[in-house]
Amino acid sequence: MAEKIKFDVSGVQKKPFPMHDPSIGGMRPATAKRTRKPVELPPEQEPYRLYTVDELGQWEPVTWLIEKHLAVGELSVLYGKGGTYKSFLALDWACRLANDGHTIVYIVAEGASGMRARIEAWKQANGVGDLPGLFLMPSNVALHGEKYVVAWIEAMRTQLGKVTPSLVIVDTLARNFVGGNEKDPQDMGQFVDGCERIRIELETAVLVLHHTTKDGDTERGTESLRNASFAMFKLTDTGGSGRGVKVTCDRMKDAEQPEPTTLHPQLVSLSDLGEGVSSLVVGWSSFPPSSPPTAKNSNEASYEASAVQRKHLHALKEGSKEGSPGISPASAAKALHVTRNNLSRTVKPLVELGFVEVTGVTTSRLYSVTARGLEALR
């Protein structure tokens, strides 16, 4: 057997393990702070930039457009059943921000005909004269189609020039997702990618309005939107004579979830726009949760029907056949002495106040006076 060779290392000076020796370009000790010059990347590679832990620490903390609710530059969602004032709350936030000097782009793909009245009501309720920073687009964009998103972004840059919007509102997901399947992860993933492209390229926050499932428990479709969002807010009708809407945060990334808030709509008469014209205002800061409508609260008048609205309610009630679940669009138009084209606009304030309920779609649609509507007739 070969004799083992022994080395005398008693007089040898030990050196650090080479990977930790800065002198030879190896890894620095954990206690040393690493600094480096940022590498210049072509634009197409910029999304794939690498950051050290120290460099991540240089990113700005969360800042707010709407305190504790709507974060700067992030994707957020308002969702709820029909009639829970999602659009009214989104518009309230949009108007407040525009009044503070922000530029807001509102994609009004649903309910565009009533937007003027809603904005006029908000301005009247808040004593505001003009909102030059609020821009509305009364059409939709297929946010799950890359070429449409690219074209939309270019159209915004053409019209806004060097102005960067602080917020883009998508009202609603369904109307800007025509042809897409909300239950298909790939389709919903493409919708989310469209929102993210807008958010990143325009350096803006994006607020998406979405509907719940039939049971009202959660948002429709896959979890793609939820997983990609910064915040999710669920709106639910509290019911009762003072009909309020509870706003609950059920997802907040990188920030503390705010406490639920209950809002109470206020009806504003807009006689300048025509007889019987009115709209609701959902005051985000004007109606804190500690001040719900009471018998002695001036807000109670918000739920009373005007003379014109009582006239419309009476016509719908009398026009409905006894034992019938409601009145058809054709019969409703005849009872109200309006054309079919103007029926929706005439009935909309009654629906928003909970005086009238709409069931079914298109030719099978029915209008029925609710218990609240019957109370308003007394």
Image: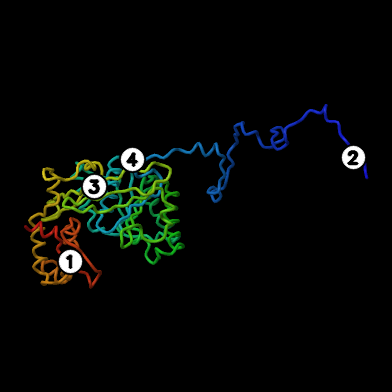
On residue 4, the disc is 2
Compare marks 4 and 3 and give the one earlier in the sequence. Answer: 4
Q: Is residue 164 left or right of residue 300?
A: right
Which class describes the residues within 10 Å of circle 2: few (<14), some (14-19), or many (20+)?
few
Where disc 1 sits, the SS reads strand
Q: Which residue has dot 1 on it?
A: 367
At 33% from the left edge and 50% from the top edge, which residue is drawn? 233
The three-letter amino acid code for the residue at tag 4 is Glu
Q: CA distance from mark 2 to mark 4?
A: 75 Å
Residue 96 figure quarter: top left
> Comparing marks 2 and 3, which lies closer to the viewer?
2
The three-letter amino acid code for the residue at tag 2 is Lys
Q: Position of residue 236 (x, y in %)?
A: 27, 53
Residues under numbered marks 2 and 1 in contact, where contact means CB atoms less than 8 Å apart: no
Q: CA distance from mark 2 to mark 3?
A: 86 Å
Which class describes the residues within 10 Å of circle 4: few (<14), some (14-19), or many (20+)?
few
On residue 67, the disc is 4
